[in-house]
Each structure stands twice: as structure tokens, then as C-alpha cells.
Image (cartoon, rainbow, N blue to C red):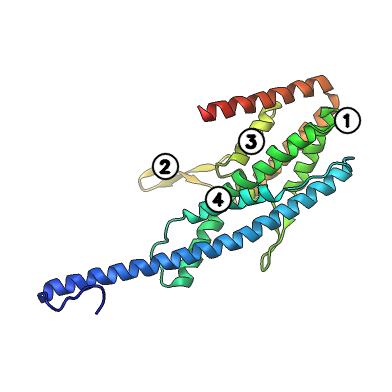
Amino acid sequence: AGFFDTRSHPPRVRRTLIVNEMTIVNDLILREWHGNARAKLQDETKGRLHKRCDVLQTIIQEQLKENGYGEFSFWIPSEKRSEICANVGEIIRQNRMPRKVDNAQDCYKKTRMWWHRDKSKFLGSFLFKPVLFDMLLPGLLHHGGVSRKQHLKAFLSIFMTILASNIRFPSTAPRPIVCQQCFLANNKFKAECDRFVRHFGYEWHRDETKIRSVQTAQGKKNKYVSNKSRCKDIVASFIAVLDKMRAAMEQQSDEFIQLKIQEWYAGQDSQALNGSA
């Protein structure tokens, strides 16, 4: 009989009520499909986030030993991992329902496609920026023993190694552990990388979109020039800047580096105050 008893209504009204009932039922089915798709994606992403944390942690620990920090233990604690997973999970939970889905499998496929397309900016803001700039960098700079210049050089070496390292998930080819698209989409990691190199007086090829003029029936127009290695070129440019920074530090005094570090943290405090205002 459905939700509505249409037998007492005229045929035209009855057809309208039946269509409304079908619309409600279809909407409920779509919502169920989408809810299940998001829940499944959240579980899969949570496992991959923990693996990324494990690999980052291992690389950092190995590089610390190679740079003479054998007594420095770096860990991403469970509380921080839970925070990362919660932040990313909330982004997935807020995902809008895909359009024109055929069945539950198709709904999941389109939801997953959205995540693979947009995940880089969220991983940049919620994973890479906190681990590298909020945990590793201050952890090294506040570590005793050698000068802060040596600490900063060690950070640059570790950073470059991480950017050149890969991770592999089941049924996938090895991929950069730091998504290269992080340097394209606007996110906190990209902004912090830019601010970091600029603070020490360097520029880097962030993203120069190339265009060329073409003749059309309506006249000359600018056309985007496709570049399949765009992300890779940007990351390589950033690594080159980090390497240049590290080499230049050999000629810079400890006092100069100490001053730049103090200015860096003063700028962070200023940003925090402006953000809360």
C-alpha cells in the first residue's frame, strides 16, 4: 500500500501521490547508500592514515640517526593520530551526495573518486603540516646539544628525504608519501612551505600555469598548455630550494640562524593571534 492510501483520491491526484511516494523512497535509499559509502571510505582512510604515520615516523627516526640524533626519539602519539583521523573523517562525513548514482556500488565509487581527487589538500592541512612543522621542526630546534643551525640543517635533510620517499598501499603502485598535489591545492602545508622558504629569503617555482595564444574563428584566445609533470616539477623545485638553503647555512653564523628562528616563531604567534581575533 506504501506510505499513502491513494484509493480514495481521483486518478490524477493518485498519480501525484504515487510519484511523491516513490521520490521519498528513492531519497531514503540514496541517503542509505551514501551513508554506507562514507562510512566505508572513513574506515579505509583511517587505516591508510595510520600507515602514513608509521612510514613518516620510520623515515624520521632513521634520518635522525643518520644526522647524529641517535638519542632523539620521534613518535606520532596515539592522541595526535586520533586527532588527524577525526579531522579527515569529518571532511568525508560532510561530503555531498553524488549525482545520478545507479546503485550502492556506484555511489561508493563516485564518493571514493571525489576523495582521491580532493584528499591532498586535507592531508596537507591535517597530516603533513602538523607532523613536519608543528612536531618535528620545534622538536629539533628545542633539542639540546648542538647549535640551532645544525638542528635546522637536520630538519632540511629529513624534509628532503621525506619528499623523495614513497609509500605503497595494497593493490596500488608506489606513490610519494607526501602527495605531490599538496603543492597545487590551497592548504596549510603548502602555505607553511611557502612561508618557511620566504622567511629565509628564498623563492620557489610554486605553480606557473603556462598558456599560449591560439587563433580561433572568434579571434585570438589564450589556451592552457598541458603539463603532465606539473606536480613533479613543483616538488623538485621546492626540494632544490631546501637543498640551496642547507648549503648556504655553511656560510651563515649561528647568531643569524638563531635570529631567523626567533623571527619565525614570532611570526607564528602573530598569525595565531590574528586568526583568533
Which numbered disc flags the more N-terminal residue, 3 or 2?
3
User: Which residue position is annotated with label 1?
Assistant: 146
User: Which residue position is annotated with label 4?
Assistant: 226
Which numbered disc flags the more N-terminal residue, 3 or 1?
1
Quadrant that contains the N terminus: bottom left
In whole angstroms, how far apart are the C-alphas of marks 4 and 1?
47 Å
Q: Nearer the viewer, mark 3 or mark 4?
A: 3
Q: Secondary structure at mark 4?
A: loop
Q: Amino acid at mark 4?
A: Ser
Residue drawn at x 12%, y 73% is 12
Q: Secondary structure at mark 1?
A: loop
**Callouts 2 and 4 close, C-beta under 8 Å:** no
- Residue 117 percent location from the top left of the image: 54, 55
In whole angstroms, how far apart are the C-alphas of marks 3 and 1?
25 Å
Q: Residues within 10 Å of mark 4 (few under 14, many from 20)?
A: few
In whole angstroms, how far apart are the C-alphas of marks 2 and 1?
60 Å
Q: Which mark is residue 27?
A: none
Q: Nearer the viewer, mark 2 or mark 1?
A: 1
Which numbered disc flags the more N-terminal residue, 3 or 4?
3
Q: Secondary structure at mark 2?
A: strand
User: Which residue position is annotated with label 3?
Assistant: 192
Q: Nearer the viewer, mark 4 or mark 1?
A: 1
- Residue 259 percent location from the top left of the image: 75, 20
In whole angstroms, how far apart are the C-alphas of marks 3 and 4?
27 Å
Q: Which mark is residue 220?
A: 2
Q: Amino acid at mark 2?
A: Lys
